[in-house]
Each structure stands twice: as structure tokens, then as C-alpha cells.
Image: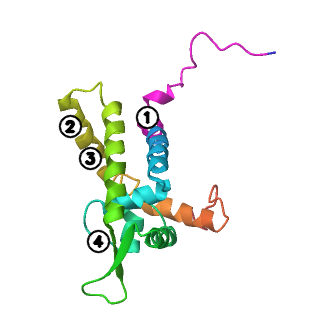
Amino acid sequence: MTETPPETPPPHSAPAAGELYYLVMRLARSFSRAAEDIAWHADISVAEFSILLVLGEGAPLSSAQLARRAFMTPQASHQLVSGLLTRRLVESLPHPTNRRVLLVSPTEEGWGVVERSRALLREMQDRATSRLSARDRAALEGNLLTVADTVLGGWFGDPEAEAEAASRRTDRRRGESGRGMRAAGD
């Protein structure tokens, strides 16, 4: 037997769509699907698309720099760069001051992929913001940058909360839940 929902929501309820977290995740999911389509058209993976988009800024970067900028591990970045090198979409260049570091930059073919992918990305972004005025579009970009900079560490500039969260992440990687565990004397 199915239960019918109450006519009035419980007093502590709130719509998920009213939470910034939920809205950002919904938007991220939509953009991820669009990125999959863009990558498919370019015959690259979404991760390769992310790397090429970052390299499309024009500055040669190391695999470690690419990892940070494309939101992936250094190992993943290294593997992806190796594949892009094999496909001749990027080339490696010597670092001007550190012989042990190689920099990566798009080849002519890679620049073509960047340009075609960026054009598709901009079409999608234009469709996504088509109901906004030019002023609201500019404000949206500025506001998103402000929020992203604010939450960069994940805890809104609260070093104690960030240290505690980092500790919990470390505990989880070791297989400990970290819940309900207190140090002696707490």
C-alpha cells in the first residue's frame, strides 16, 4: 500500500532546489552532459577536453599544473598528457629554468580541437544563458567567480573547519569513518 504525501510539508522541510549546493550540482550535471557531447564531437574524452580547454589559455603548463587546473590527480594528468602526446594533440617543451620539468602546449592540430570544442562550448553556454539579459549574464559570471573563490578551500575561509575536514578525509582514505571518534580527553 502506498502512502499519500501530507498536504502540508513537515515544519522542518525545505525544497532542495532552494539550496545553492543543489542548484550548483544540477548545473554541474547539465554542463557535464554537454561536455560529454562536445568531447564526443572532437573524438576526445571529457578529461582530455578539460586539459585542452586549460591549455587553450595559451600558456604551456606542466602535468602537475594541468592536474590542479583541470581538477584531476597528477597521475591522471600524466596519463592523459601521454595519450595526447601520442595523438599529436599536444607537444612537450623544455621548462625555461627546471630541466626536470616538461611543459605541454597544444600542437596545430590540438589548437584546432581547442577552437572547435570552445565554439561548441560557447554555443551551449549561450543557450544556457539565453533568457538572461546581457547585464545579468555578466553579473552571473562575476558572481560565480566570487562564490568559487570564496569556497575554494571548501570552508569559506575558516582554517579550523578546513583542517578538521581534511583530517576526516584522511581518516576515510585509511578506512576509518571518523564519526563518533574522539581523542582521549575530548
Near-viewer residue (80 or 42):
42
* Cα separation between marks 4 and 2: 28 Å
Q: Is residue 52 visible?
A: yes
Q: Amino acid at mark 3?
A: Thr
* Cα separation between marks 3 and 4: 26 Å
Q: Which residue is mark 3?
A: 146
Q: Is residue 20 magenta?
A: yes
Q: Is residue 159 visible?
A: no
Do the residues bearing badges 3 and 2 touch, measured as CB atoms within 8 Å?
no
Q: Residue at x 42, y 67 (%)?
A: 67
Circle 3 — which element?
helix
- From which residue to which does the magenta span run? 2-27
Q: Amino acid at mark 1?
A: Leu
Q: Quadrant of residue 152?
A: bottom left
Q: Residue at x 55, y 62 (%)?
A: 169
For disc 3, the neighbor class at 10 Å (few under 14, some 14 to 19, many from 20) is few
In this view, the residue farthest toward the left is 135
* Cα separation between marks 1 and 2: 19 Å
For disc 4, the neighbor class at 10 Å (few under 14, some 14 to 19, many from 20) is many
Task: Give the vertical position of 104 relative to 181 (above or below).
Answer: below
Front position among marks 1 and 2: 2
Q: Which residue is mark 1?
A: 23
* Cα separation between marks 1 and 4: 34 Å
Q: Which residue is mark 4?
A: 60
* Cα separation between marks 1 and 3: 16 Å
In this view, the residue farthest toward the bottom is 99
Q: Amino acid at mark 4?
A: Pro
* Cα separation between marks 3 and 2: 12 Å
**In the rendered view, does 94 fall on the left or right side of 161?**
left
Q: Which residue is mark 2?
A: 138
